[in-house]
Image: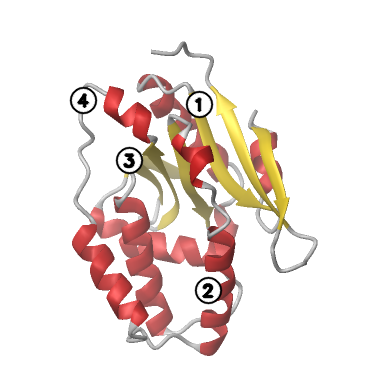
Amino acid sequence: MFTIRPYREEDTEGCGRCFYEGFFTCPINENDRIFLRDYAQVLIEKCSFAYVAEASDHQIVGFISGNYGKRFRSMKTDPDQCKKHYVAWCRMFLKFYLKRYRLSDAFQKQLDGFILQAREREETFFDGCDLELVALTSRRDYRKGLGTALVSRFMDRAVADGVRNVRLLTNTLASWEFYEKRGFTKILEKPFPDGSEEKTIIYEYCTGQREK
């Protein structure tokens, strides 16, 4: 059993673990875990809102976050209560740029691949939507029903806020079929630039709400 609740700053270590288990397969050391914690914190806190899944043993087993598009954000009458993440971002980026995390070779290699895939995000597709689903990760042991619960809570929030459409970036290395089964429609598909057979995909979900 698990509970879906709003993200809190003390959840960062658990979210970093979920981020690792959702996207990486190599063994990691303590330096890698510190980077994952810092990255997850910046990723989540730069968004408009985030929810975590907390298991009965109080472990964080999944998280999901959303970021309002520029046009939609200016239409909202109630400002988002978000912690400022700029200091944490600058600190993490500088430490990463100067190689002070001292990441393991295996993790660094997989991280380089992850960053390359993330750069496939096309700004025009997300400037034109009301809300971007930024991250959805979960522990493999808790996957059954967890993703559905997180997405359901996310969409409840989207509808309550008056969001008309939601978009997300994924690829064929991830659980892209998960989104198709939940009503998301593919609006862009393009091959990886590395010449492999993998593809980057952008999905959209329309809530059916009217334009404001």
Report which residue position mark 2 lands on.
111
Report which residue position mark 1 lands on.
165
156 or 119: nearer the viewer: 119
Residue 141 coordinates in the image, percent (x, y): 58, 58
Whether residue 181 is situated above or below residue 193 in the rendered picture:
above
Q: Are marks 2 and 1 in contact (CB under 8 Å)?
A: no
Q: SS at mark 1?
A: strand
Q: Are marks 3 and 4 in contact (CB under 8 Å)?
A: no
Report which residue position mark 4 lands on.
78
The kind of residue tagged 3 is Phe
Residue 97 in which image quadrant: bottom left
Residue depicted at x 69% and y 35%: 180
Q: Are marks 3 and 2 in contact (CB under 8 Å)?
A: no
Residue 54 coordinates in the image, percent (x, y): 39, 49
Whether residue 203 is situated above or below residue 142 in the rendered picture:
above
The kind of residue tagged 2 is Leu
Residue depicted at x 66% and y 46%: 201
| Marks 2 and 1, the one that precedes in the sequence | 2
The kind of residue tagged 1 is Asn
Residue 37 coordinates in the image, percent (x, y): 35, 68
Residue depicted at x 32% and y 68%: 38
* Apparent side of residue 154 relative to residue 119 in the rendered image (left or right): left
Q: SS at mark 4?
A: loop
Q: CA distance from mark 4 to mark 2?
A: 37 Å
Whether residue 60 is situated above or below residue 195 in the rendered picture:
above
Mark number for residue 42?
A: none
The kind of residue tagged 4 is Asp
Report which residue position mark 3 lands on.
49
